[in-house]
Image (cartoon, rainbow, N blue to C red):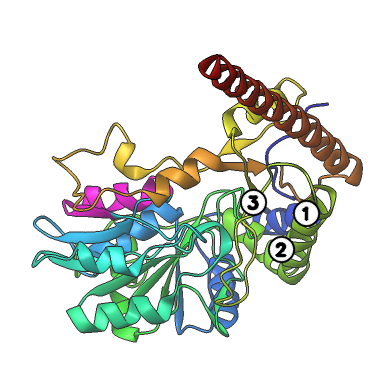
Amino acid sequence: MPINEFCPQIGKAEILSVLETLEDNWVTEGKKTKQLEGMLADYFGCKRVVMVPNGTLALFAALKVLGIGPGDEVIVPDFTFFASASAVVLTGAKPVLVDVDELDGNISVAAARASLSDRTKAIMPVHIYGQSCDMQAVMELARCHGLLVVEDAAQGMGVTFGDKHVGTFGDIGCMSFFADKTLTTGEGGALLVNDEELARRCVYFKNQGRLRRGTFVHEHMGYNFRITDLQAAIGVAQFERIAQTIRHKRSLCAAYARRLSGCPGVRWPADNGFGQAVPFRVNILVDDPEGLARFLADRDIAVRRFFYPLHLQPSLNAANCVVRQQPVNSVRLFEAGLMLPSGLDLAETEVDYVCACILEYQRAHAADARGAGTRDASSRLSRAVCRSL
């Protein structure tokens, strides 16, 4: 049977929670959504959580609520999922793509500082692959230059900077609850807010310019960015075991690390030590990720490459984004990175099989490299002998 790159863990608790919602005959946004928002606000340590349909719309809503629009620039790391940039473009503003730290793939504050202009209105740090950015440095930069901060914490469930949850440092934090996230609602996202007036503006924006449903008086311009209680019901059940899920994700990463210890050419992304990390996927760095990916695919193992650098995306160009310094580290990460199967239902035998296949490929790859090196050395020696005759 093929080994999927990732499958969400949905069990009896989620099914029963959805059935309860169906039996209540309330499937649009309602009490389950309110319950989940309260649970998450307590967990994140923020005043308000406002649920929205997905993480991309969370970013778009945050930017719009904060007044970002045409003529503005938003600093965005070059190494991230496409939505970080597209959300900015959809507001009419331009993402300014900056390089990242090769150590952890998070935004380089030095690169961000070098790319500021008088049009820069905000910065969007992305907590990539389950590790926090250096939020102290990000917030200092924002304070010095009067920038708004929209945190892309889509992959940040359970992740902290120090003892504070990511997504709660800036003006608005954005979460995603897509199927591959640590907590899923199928599709879903959230805005994390610590200012009551800002939270009201978020509700106006997502609820068609009203604070509550059932009225046809719309005080502000808004959209329908509500979710359903069916989605929230899944999230409530998922939240009940969030600590167990986080432990499982860490133990899975450790299991891979043990089995691949000493595997030639396999490197691991560094732990930056800023706080609690929660692996988004099990990631490795190798010299030939595309070759390894093809080898694994031939053996019914699905993997994915790292995120493609934004400045190389065909839909991002000089008309809709800005690049003031050519990113280098984002390219290096893409050229080396591979995401291994990371589903929470992976059996030990499946992890064993994946690692055995990686070992087989990497050992052959290393042997080929040694052979090429020996042939090169022999050729150099022959040329030297010929020159001496």
Q: Is residue 309 above or below residue 291?
A: below
Which amino acid, by three-letter code, is at mark 2?
A: Ala
Q: Is residue 354 above or below residue 283?
A: above
The residue to which callout 2 is attached is 237
Nearer the N terminus, badge 2 or badge 3? 2
Q: Residues within 10 Å of mark 2 (few under 14, many from 20)?
A: many
46 falls in the magenta region: no
Q: What distance separates the C-alpha of mark 1 from that of mark 3? A: 13 Å
Q: Which residues are magenta?
A: 81-97
Q: Secondary structure at mark 3?
A: loop
> Residue 249, percent across and down?
73, 59
Q: Is residue 190 left or right of residue 146?
A: right
The residue to which callout 1 is attached is 257
Residue at screen point 39% across, 58% down: 100
Q: Nearer the viewer, residue 138 or 111?
A: 111
Residue at screen point 58% across, 85% down: 163
> Residue 15, percent across and down?
75, 52
* Furthest residue toward right: 349
* Furthest residue toward front: 389
Q: Residues within 10 Å of mark 3 (few under 14, many from 20)?
A: many
Pointer 2 with pointer 1, Cβ within 8 A: no
Q: Quadrant of the N terminus?
A: top right
Mark whose residue sits in front, 2 or 3: 3
Q: Nearer the viewer, residue 50 or 363?
A: 363
Q: Secondary structure at mark 2?
A: helix
Nearer the N terminus, badge 2 or badge 1? 2
> Residue 4, percent across and down?
72, 35
Q: Residues within 10 Å of mark 1 (few under 14, many from 20)?
A: some
Which amino acid, by three-letter code, is at mark 1?
A: Ala
> Residue 379, percent across and down?
60, 18
**Mark drawn on residue 281:** 3
Residue 264 seen by the camera: yes
